[in-house]
């Protein structure tokens, strides 16, 4: 087990003593979509039969000849099946009794709002699909999307899927350079962006960032710009390249036939941070992904026809892809999209949205819950939250205090909490309670979803047994699993499938207790989880070293009360450069410019040396001990143990490096 998992293990020993258990109420169980515990056994005995039954809920142009073809690590689900994701998410509902049902309820940060019924959504998607075609997009062409949380973002994704052009959504909080890197990796032909986005009353300069990115993106031919902030953003349109969304759709037909896609055709690419190297383009395909996301959405959130469902994630992350757009819409469910920040114009914004739309299902992140805790119970107390039925969390382990706070103040001790574990790569939730069945324990994501086989292993493919920490591994394929890393299949094999024969290595540490409940212990690799965002230490180090003053940098994630982890950078400067508070700010700003505001280091600490082993590897474990004020771990492998004690003293004297 790595150093990091060992540390996590210590702090989570306490967590495992958590004895409270919250079974579903009889009332909830009676009405739940899933209330028969046999579902687990049935899926175990007939994995393919279980998923085939679920797949029948979708509309297929051609049914599959085989449910699963598994040549580890290569999976094909619903072989020979033909379908279209958008047809399933939009068209079929627009032709049904759901015609006038709200598909998307959108709330803008300034207070404007828009509701799109399934029928209206179908028209908008068709118009934009025709626009994409007229700009030269064909089946298989990649389309990059760099937008804020506006309805056009979902429309753009669905339009891409309608014509079979894989989208690559880049989170609007990424910098121009990050956007450029992702566009180039995917070789995208078209970019869709906004003039700007609203965030805490200010403007995120999306088009300006896009322009900067586009100085080095030879494959981009056309750019479509949604007008969102108008005069608040000063933007330039480049003739022949840039077009306004509203002008293009005004003349586009609202009829567009769905492209029949093979179940294994690519639906999208989404970039995520890995331990080393550039971000990885995680590839998701059409059939299995849609089956996996819609099934988990319906069962885990106990979705009913009249429900209003709200996932607070940004669509720039996988949670938004699977559980704002594809999963809910495939189920014909009303999905809420909110543009802005939870504390704008005040700290009651989320609860005012819940009350305004009578939200039934609410899905958010532990980092947000910890902010709400700090802001005080008076904010949710002001609002009518009685519409809520199920509440969920995702993104990082939830500490029991936050869980209990959520249960009492948001769920009002009535709503089951679903703590859902999954990843960009897994596409769908894999470890989770089923709200009508599972007795939850605060801090545990409980059990693998039916048909999912998870194990906790030591470094040698041996099960560690109850209570012991180890690596979380998935031993059977699941339909929404990613199929490869875009353009780099070797990396897919190396990074995820070479640790254990035929099993998927998650990069997370975990424990299983005597009841078979899983407790997630955080990442065991050099990936940080900062406010639920995955950022690799390597990326931040590269950004720091890119600054002309920096000789060497080591970055670690250190425990942070609200964000889960904060970023601390230990930096050695080049000969003759003087450390100063101004330089610290400059370095933080440099990281923002290279990666984006989400990667801004909390602390920068200047040091003349970094602790290294005799083979010159930086000992991050010791830096974490220093940053978190712990007694130093084993220093015997260090080339010069004195470096660490000096550094520790200096760190304490200077006060956390700030
Ligand atoms: C972490 C987000 C504990 C985990 C969907 C994983 C969690 C990484 C949980 C994936 C949870 C996500 N409990 N840890 N319920 N959910 N994680 O790719 O470390 O942005 O590997 O996907 O988040 O982050 P990603």
Image (cartoon, rainbow, N blue to C red):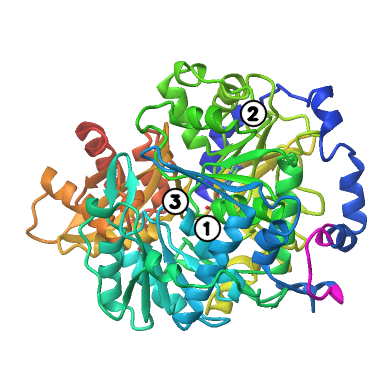
Residue at image coords 15%, 60%? 549
The answer to the question of whether label 3 and label 2 lie on touching residues, with beta carbons closer than 8 A, is no
Q: Nearer the viewer, residue 154 or 297?
A: 154
Q: Name the side, left or right, on which 625 lies relative to 407.
A: left
Q: Position of residue 86 (x, y in %)?
A: 64, 65
Q: Which quarter shows the C terminus?
A: top left
Name the residue carrying label 3: 149
Q: Name the side, left or right, on which 618 lies relative to 485.
A: left
Instruction: Assign a secondary structure to mark 1.
Output: helix
Q: Name the side, left or right, on which 41 lies relative to 363.
A: right
Name the residue carrying label 1: 154
The vertical placement of 412 against 327, above or below, is above
- Magenta region, residue range: 54-66
The vertical placement of 189 against 286, above or below, is below
Q: Please identify the dominant SS of the magenta region.
A: loop
Of callouts 2 and 1, the N-terminal one = 1
User: Is residue 155 one of those drawn in magenta?
Assistant: no
Residue 316 seen: no
Residue at image coords 47%, 35%? 368
Of callouts 1 and 3, the N-terminal one = 3
Residue at image coords 34%, 31%? 345
Instruction: Assign a secondary structure to mark 3.
Output: loop
Name the residue carrying label 2: 388
- Among the 4 quarters of the image, the one containing residue 639: bottom left
Q: Position of residue 136 (x, y in %)?
A: 46, 84
Q: Nearer the viewer, residue 477 or 211?
A: 211
The answer to the question of whether label 2 and label 1 lie on touching residues, with beta carbons closer than 8 A, is no
């Amino acid at each position: 087990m790595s150093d990091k998992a060992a540390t996590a293990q210590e702090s989570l020993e306490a967590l495992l003593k958590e004895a409270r258990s919250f079974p579903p109420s009889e009332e909830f169980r009676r009405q739940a979509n899933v209330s028969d515990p046999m579902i687990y056994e049935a899926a175990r005995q007939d994995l393919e039969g279980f998923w085939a039954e679920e797949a029948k809920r979708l509309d297929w142009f051609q049914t599959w000849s085989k449910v699963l073809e598994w040549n580890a690590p290569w999976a094909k689900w619903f072989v020979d099946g033909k379908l279209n994701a958008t047809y399933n998410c939009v068209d079929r509902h627009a032709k049904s009794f759901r015609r006038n049902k709200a598909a998307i309820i959108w709330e803008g940060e300034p207070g404007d709002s828009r509701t799109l019924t399934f029928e209206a959504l179908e028209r908008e998607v068709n118009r934009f699909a025709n626009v994409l075609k007229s700009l030269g997009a064909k089946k298989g062409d990649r389309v990059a999307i760099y937008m804020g949380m506006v309805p056009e973002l979902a429309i753009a994704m669905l339009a891409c899927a309608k014509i079979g052009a894989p989208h690559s959504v880049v989170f609007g909080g990424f910098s121009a350079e990050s956007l450029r890197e992702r566009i180039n990796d995917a070789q995208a032909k078209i970019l869709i962006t906004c003039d700007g986005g609203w965030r805490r009353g200010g403007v995120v300069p999306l088009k300006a960032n896009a322009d900067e990115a586009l100085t080095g993106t030879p494959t981009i031919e056309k750019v479509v710009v949604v007008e969102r902030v108008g005069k608040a953003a000063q933007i330039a349109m480049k003739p022949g390249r840039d077009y306004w969304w509203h002008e293009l759709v005004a003349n586009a037909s609202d009829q567009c036939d769905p492209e029949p896609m093979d179940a294994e055709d690519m639906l999208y690419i989404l970039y995520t941070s890995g331990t080393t190297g550039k971000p990885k383009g995680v590839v998701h395909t059409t059939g299995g992904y849609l089956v996996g996301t819609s099934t988990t959405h319906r069962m885990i959130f106990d979705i009913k026809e009249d429900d209003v469902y709200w996932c607070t994630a940004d669509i720039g992350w996988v949670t938004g892809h699977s559980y704002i757009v594809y999963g809910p819409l495939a189920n014909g469910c009303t999905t809420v999209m909110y543009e802005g920040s939870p504390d704008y114009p005040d700290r009651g914004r989320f609860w005012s949205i819940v009350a305004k739309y009578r939200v039934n299902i609410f899905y958010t992140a532990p980092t947000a819950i910890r902010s709400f805790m700090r802001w005080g119970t008076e904010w949710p107390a002001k609002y009518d939250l009685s519409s809520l039925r199920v509440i969920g969390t995702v993104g990082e382990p939830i500490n029991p205090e936050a869980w209990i706070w959520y249960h009492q103040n948001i769920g009002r001790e009535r709503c089951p909490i679903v703590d859902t574990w999954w990843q960009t790569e897994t596409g769908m939730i894999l470890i989770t309670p089923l709200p009508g069945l599972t007795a939850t324990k605060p801090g545990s994501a409980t059990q693998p979803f039916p048909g999912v086989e998870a194990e906790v292993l030591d470094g040698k493919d041996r099960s560690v047994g109850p209570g012991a920490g180890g690596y979380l591994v998935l031993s059977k394929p699941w339909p929404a699993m990613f199929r490869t890393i875009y353009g780099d299949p070797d990396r897919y094999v190396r990074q995820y499938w070479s640790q254990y024969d035929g099993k998927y290595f998650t990069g997370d540490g975990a424990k299983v207790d005597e009841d078979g409940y899983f407790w997630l212990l955080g990442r065991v690799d050099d990936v940080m989880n900062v406010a639920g965002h995955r950022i690799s230490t390597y990326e931040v180090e590269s950004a720091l070293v890119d600054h002309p003053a920096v000789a060497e940098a080591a970055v670690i994630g250190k425990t942070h009360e609200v964000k889960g982890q904060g970023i601390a950078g230990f930096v050695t400067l080049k000969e003759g450069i003087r450390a100063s508070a101004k330089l610290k700010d400059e370095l933080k700003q440099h990281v923002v410019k290279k990666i984006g505001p989400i990667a801004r280091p909390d602390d920068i600490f200047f040091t003349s040396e970094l602790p290294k082993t005799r083979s010159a590897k930086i000992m991050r474990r010791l830096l974490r001990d220093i940053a978190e004020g712990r007694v130093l771990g084993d220093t015997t492998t260090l080339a010069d143990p004195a470096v660490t004690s000096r550094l520790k003293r200096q760190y304490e004297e200077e006060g956390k490096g700030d």
